Each structure stands twice: as structure tokens, then as C-alpha cells.
Image (cartoon, helix red, strand yellow):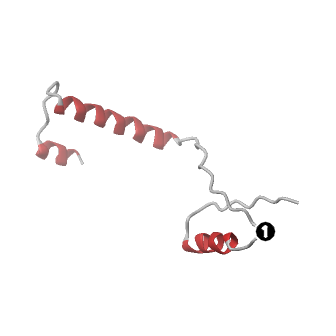
């Protein structure tokens, strides 16, 4: 009868458990890809701002946009 045990994090204890389980001849351990989760509104806003910053950086490197002053950037923070 097969069972599925899901390890939800990579703590040292969890990884030690997985290593011990691998040594058992009746256990098959398979690492699965983490499913995409839904972003919170705050995470969505951060992602949007981050992607915009990357686009601006690319435009600056391509000479399509002028870089701002570092002092102004630090004052915004």
C-alpha cells in the first residue's frame, strides 16, 4: 500500500529525515517541483515595481534613457 509524505521545507531536520528515508529499501524518495503559488497583493506590487526597474535599467544600458543622480535615488529611500 503506497503512502505519500510531503516535506514542506528545507530545514536541517527535514533534510536529515529525507536522507534517513532514502536508506530504507522499501522507500522511494522523489523530489518534486514546488507548485506555483498565488502572490499576495503586496508581492504583486513588488514584482511589478521590480520588473519596471529592470526595464529601466535595460533602457539605460542601451542608451535609450538617462540614468538619474545617485543622491536623488538615496533620498527617495
- The residue lying at 62 percent from left, 72 percent from top is 19
Task: Tell me if 23 is positioned left or right of 49 in this view.
Answer: right
Question: Is 17 on the left or on the right of 64, as rendered?
Answer: right
43 relative to 74 in the view: left or right: right
Quarter-of-image position of residue 26: bottom right
Q: Residue 49 appears at what percent x and percent y?
A: 35, 37
In front here: 46 or 28? 28
Relative to residue 4, is residue 23 depicted above or below?
below
The residue sitting at 17% across, 32% down in the picture is 60
How many numbered discs, if any? 1
Direction top: furthest residue:
64
Quarter in which the N terminus is drawn: bottom right
* Other-residue count near label 1 (Cα within 10 Å), few / some / many at <14 / 14–19 / ≥20: few
Label 1 secondary element: loop
Question: What residue is pinned by disc 1?
Answer: 26
Q: Residue at x 64, y 69 (%)?
A: 18
Q: Is residue 14 above or below residue 1?
A: below
Amino acid at each position: 500500500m503506497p503512502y505519500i509524505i510531503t516535506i514542506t521545507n528545507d530545514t536541517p531536520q527535514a533534510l536529515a529525515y529525507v536522507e534517513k528515508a532514502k536508506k530504507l529499501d522499501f522507500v522511494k524518495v522523489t523530489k518534486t517541483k514546488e507548485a506555483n503559488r498565488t502572490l499576495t497583493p503586496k508581492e504583486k506590487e513588488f514584482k511589478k515595481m521590480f520588473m519596471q526597474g529592470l526595464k529601466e535599467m535595460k533602457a539605460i544600458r542601451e542608451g535609450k534613457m538617462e540614468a538619474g543622480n545617485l543622491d536623488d535615488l538615496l533620498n527617495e529611500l
